[in-house]
Image (spheres, rainbow, N blue to C red):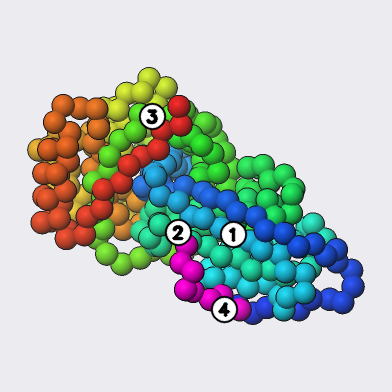
């Protein structure tokens, strides 16, 4: 975290003279991001909106310092207002004055479909809990986040099926061997809240297909079948074109086939696409380099990520 930045107040909350306990402590925590989703769509059931996570080795780190005699709640960077709101909610529930400094340092780009906001919020909840010395299990975090915005399933050290609109776990699917993702960014940014307010144009047949894809990815993760994981991810990316079209999807799919990749994964509500590569495959470094070069020629903005394995 940079030591040259100074915190700027963001609408400090007034501190009542009485009625709150005073404590002074500091807590730190992290949360990983994702590279889009292996699968995202709508199931036939009520509250059928769901996704399947693809955790990657990029993190948000939150540090919360309680300042009993401070002017109110502050956050840095100043635009992290959702994290500031979450901090205030937790302090209020614990009967504590809304005072303190929250700092967030993230390696996740915003608005790209990499769960940057979800990681910020989960890291914040854990950091505040660490400062207060209170439990903050995933279900409690889910209840807070459901009051703020749709959320990715980065609360869980696993590949999970997650109901992102209602913010609740559907199932832990397990862990996969680590993969490389040759990621490309088509540019721009997507507001997650606005995107999730858009009615999804999926038919009953689409919903049944998503149910089949969820069954397939569940079995693939259990069997550690990376080829099947890639096939499901590509199918989901193509089905999402009616909701958020990505002009480079088919060219990226062609590159994937050329370099022997597993499949194409996308940020369904973002601007990113990536080619999944099995790092244990023969000649992976050479094929990874070719994939990165071809994607750079196509899109111009390429970053290689590594997925997380939780074995």
Earlier-in-chain disc, 1 versus 3:
1
The alpha-carbon separation of the residues under discs 3 and 4 comes to 41 Å
Q: Could you say whether the residue bearing mark 3 is in a helix, strand or loop?
A: loop
Q: Is residue 212 visible?
A: no
In the picture as drawn, the residue positioned furthest to the top comes out as 223
Q: Residue furthest right?
A: 18
Q: For the point 45% across and 51% down, which residue is it?
A: 59
Residue assigned mark 2: 106
Q: Main secondary structure of the magenta part?
A: loop
Please, is residue 135 above or below residue 107 in the view?
above
Does label 4 or label 2 sit earlier along the sequence?
4
First-in-chain label (2 vs 3) = 2
Query: In the image, is residue 68 part of the stretch drawn in magenta?
Result: no
- Dot label at residue 176: 3
Q: Position of residue 16 (x, y in %)?
A: 84, 76
Ranked by sequence position, the earlier of labels 1 and 4 is 4
């Amino acid at each position: 975290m940079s030591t040259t930045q100074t915190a700027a107040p963001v609408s400090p909350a007034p501190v009542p003279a009485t009625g709150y306990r005073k404590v002074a402590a500091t807590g730190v925590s992290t949360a990983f991001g994702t590279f889009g989703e292996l699968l995202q769509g709508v199931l036939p059931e009520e509250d059928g909106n769901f996704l399947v996570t693809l955790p990657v080795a990029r993190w948000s780190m939150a540090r919360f310092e309680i300042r009993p005699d401070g002017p109110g709640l502050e956050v840095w960077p100043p635009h992290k207002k959702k994290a500031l709101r979450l901090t205030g909610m937790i302090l209020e529930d614990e009967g504590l004055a809304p005072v303190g400094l929250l700092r967030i340092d993230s390696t996740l780009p915003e608005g790209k479909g990499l769960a940057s906001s979800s990681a910020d919020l989960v890291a914040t909840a854990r950091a505040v809990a660490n400062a207060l010395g209170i439990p903050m299990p995933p279900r409690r975090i889910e209840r807070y986040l459901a009051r703020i915005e749709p959320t990715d399933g980065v609360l869980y050290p696993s590949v999970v099926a997650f109901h992102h609109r209602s913010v609740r776990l559907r199932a832990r699917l397990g862990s996969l061997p680590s993969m490389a993702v040759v990621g490309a960014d088509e540019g721009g940014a997507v507001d997650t809240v606005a995107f999730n307010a858009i009615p999804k144009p999926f038919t009953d047949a689409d919903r049944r297909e998503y149910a089949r894809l969820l069954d397939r990815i569940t079995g693939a993760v259990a069997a550690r079948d990376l080829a099947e994981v890639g096939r499901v991810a590509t199918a989901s990316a193509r089905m999402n074109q009616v909701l958020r079209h990505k002009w480079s999807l088919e060219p990226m799919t062609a590159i994937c086939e050329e370099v022997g990749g597993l499949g194409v994964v996308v940020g369904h509500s973002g601007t990113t696409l990536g080619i999944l590569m099995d790092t244990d495959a023969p000649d992976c470094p050479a094929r990874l380099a070719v994939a990165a070069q071809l994607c750079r020629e196509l899109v111009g903005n390429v970053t290689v990520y590594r997925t997380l394995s939780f074995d």
